[in-house]
């Protein structure tokens, strides 16, 4: 055991990012978990000896992180090293060093994190290496009882221009083997974790060799073997939080597999816009017709359809907004619920810089929300996201 203590900023929005790293570190170091700022500051002040702080965060959190790092640095504590990784730092490593971090790990951290902690490098920006075989890494820590969804696939070939996933993990989609997933489920069951959830960019792409086609055989093998293992003692949630499904992957066959083996009563479908022009501009790779078809099949099969839509994309015009409103109205009449978001520009995506522009909801969108809200047909954090977007614009106006 090294004399080094690791403190993970285990914020609720980022905790799953650390889960593959904890098993790599737990045999060498003492690890502490801070769920919020208060816990973090008290651990930093309370723990004796060398301390390494690990952070992972999204673009949406940059202001809170900036303030927190200022507070930590103002404590003037010795033997303190700050390491950042994850979606936002990967895209803007230099900015993160300027905020007061000592190192930034870009991309996937599994192969580099242990070496970096054991031996501080001269180079402040460390580039990770793609994990080609997910089976080699555990997705949670039994020792520290940090359980969560099982990461079954990583990387996404679609490259939607607003999304950080393909820029963080690459476009090569890799899958954990069914044997390995079953072993992990044994660990979960042994620890009395009976709800089985998954992390994947697109649940129905499990086993796909290119991430774009459906591997019906492996998809059924996966769900069937999990069901056989857990029998009726546990529940399987597939294609719902924390992962979602692309609309063109929904068909009678894929939905019948979910109906047959899983316990979720709803599916989350990424639709994003009701304007064909915007879908093209954001490189979505599916059509509006796919959204209607997916919704129809899901509802016909007695599942709830939760549909993600985003307003405020760069270059979205009045006409695009009108078209999206029409599509949303049609879909809610069919029985769907809308999960509404405000577009937030995320670092390293092609829409980051052009997305740093003010946006507000026009009369038509407000009317739509007013109409759907009391009926429970729309939900989401669009107001908070509007505020975050405004604050990001201010932040980057003053940056550099
Ligand atoms: S939004 Fe979904 S499909 Fe598009 S790049 Fe991100 S993970 Fe892939």
Image (spheres, rainbow, N blue to C red):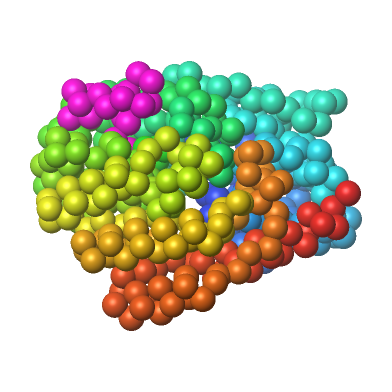
Q: Position of residue 51 (x, y in %)?
A: 74, 45
Q: Position of residue 314 (x, y in %)?
A: 61, 51
Q: Which of 245 and 29 is in front in this view?
A: 245
User: Is residue 141 visible in this depiction of the protein?
Assistant: no
User: Is residue 354 visible in this depiction of the protein?
Assistant: yes
What residue appears at the point 52 percent right and 49 percent down from the top-left corner?
15
Q: Where is residue 12 in the image (x, y as percent from the top left)?
A: 52, 57
What residue appears at the point 69 percent right and 48 percent down from the top-left corner?
354
Q: Nearer the viewer, residue 378 or 14?
A: 378
Is residue 62 positioned above or below 203 on the image? below
Is residue 86 positioned above or below 305 on the image? above
Q: Residue furthest front?
A: 319
Please tell me whether residue 50 belongs to the stretch shown in magenta.
no
Q: Which of 83 and 87 is in front in this view?
A: 87
Which span of residues is magenta-colored?
Answer: 203-220
Q: Position of residue 383 (x, y in %)?
A: 54, 71
Picture quadrant where residue 394 is located: bottom right
Picture quadrant where residue 95 is located: top right
Asked if residue 66 lies left or right of residue 133, the reply is: right
Count of numbered marks? 0
Asked if residue 155 lies left or right of residue 111, the reply is: left
Q: Quadrant of the N terminus?
A: top right
What residue appears at the point 77 percent right and 30 percent down from the top-left corner?
125
Please tell me whether residue 210 belongs to the stretch shown in magenta.
yes
What residue appears at the point 28 percent right and 36 percent down from the top-left corner?
249
Asked if residue 232 lies left or right of residue 377, the reply is: left
């Amino acid at each position: 055991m090294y004399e080094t203590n690791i403190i993970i900023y285990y914020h609720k929005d980022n905790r799953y990012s650390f889960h593959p790293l904890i098993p790599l570190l737990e045999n060498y170091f003492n690890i502490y978990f801070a769920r919020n700022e208060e816990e973090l500051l008290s651990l930093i002040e309370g723990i004796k000896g060398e301390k390494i702080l690990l952070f992972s965060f999204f673009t949406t959190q940059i202001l809170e992180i900036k303030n927190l790092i200022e507070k930590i640095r103002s404590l003037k504590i010795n033997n303190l090293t700050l390491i950042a990784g994850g979606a936002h730092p990967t895209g803007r490593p230099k900015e993160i060093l300027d905020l007061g971090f000592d190192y930034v790990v870009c991309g996937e951290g599994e192969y580099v994190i242990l070496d970096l902690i054991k031996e501080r490098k001269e180079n402040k920006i460390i580039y990770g290496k793609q994990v080609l075989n997910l089976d080699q890494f555990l997705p949670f820590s039994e020792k520290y009882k940090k359980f969560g969804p099982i990461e079954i696939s990583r990387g996404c070939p679609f490259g939607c221009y607003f999304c950080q996933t393909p820029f963080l993990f690459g476009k090569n989609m890799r899958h954990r083997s069914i044997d390995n997933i079953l072993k992990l489920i044994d660990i979960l069951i042994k620890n009395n974790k009976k709800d089985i959830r998954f992390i994947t960019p697109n649940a129905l792409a499990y086993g796909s060799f290119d991430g774009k086609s459906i591997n019906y055989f492996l998809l059924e093998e996966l769900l069937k073997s999990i069901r056989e293992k857990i029998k009726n003692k546990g529940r399987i949630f597939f294609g719902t939080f924390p992962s979602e499904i692309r609309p063109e992957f929904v068909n009678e066959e894929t939905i019948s597999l979910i109906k047959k083996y899983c316990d979720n009563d709803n599916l989350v479908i990424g639709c994003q816009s009701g304007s064909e022009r915007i879908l093209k501009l954001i490189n979505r790779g599916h059509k509006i017709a796919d959204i209607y078809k997916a919704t129809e099949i899901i509802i016909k099969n007695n599942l709830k359809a939760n549909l993600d839509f985003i307003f405020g994309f760069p270059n979205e015009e009045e006409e695009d907004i009108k078209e999206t409103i029409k599509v949303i109205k049609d879909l809610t009449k069919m029985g769907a619920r809308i999960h509404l978001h405000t577009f937030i520009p995320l670092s390293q995506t092609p829409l980051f810089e052009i997305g740093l522009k003010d946006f507000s909801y026009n009369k038509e969108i407000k009317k739509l929300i007013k109409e759907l809200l009391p009926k429970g047909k729309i939900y989401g954090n669009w107001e908070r996201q509007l505020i975050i977007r405004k604050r990001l614009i201010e932040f980057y106006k003053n940056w550099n």
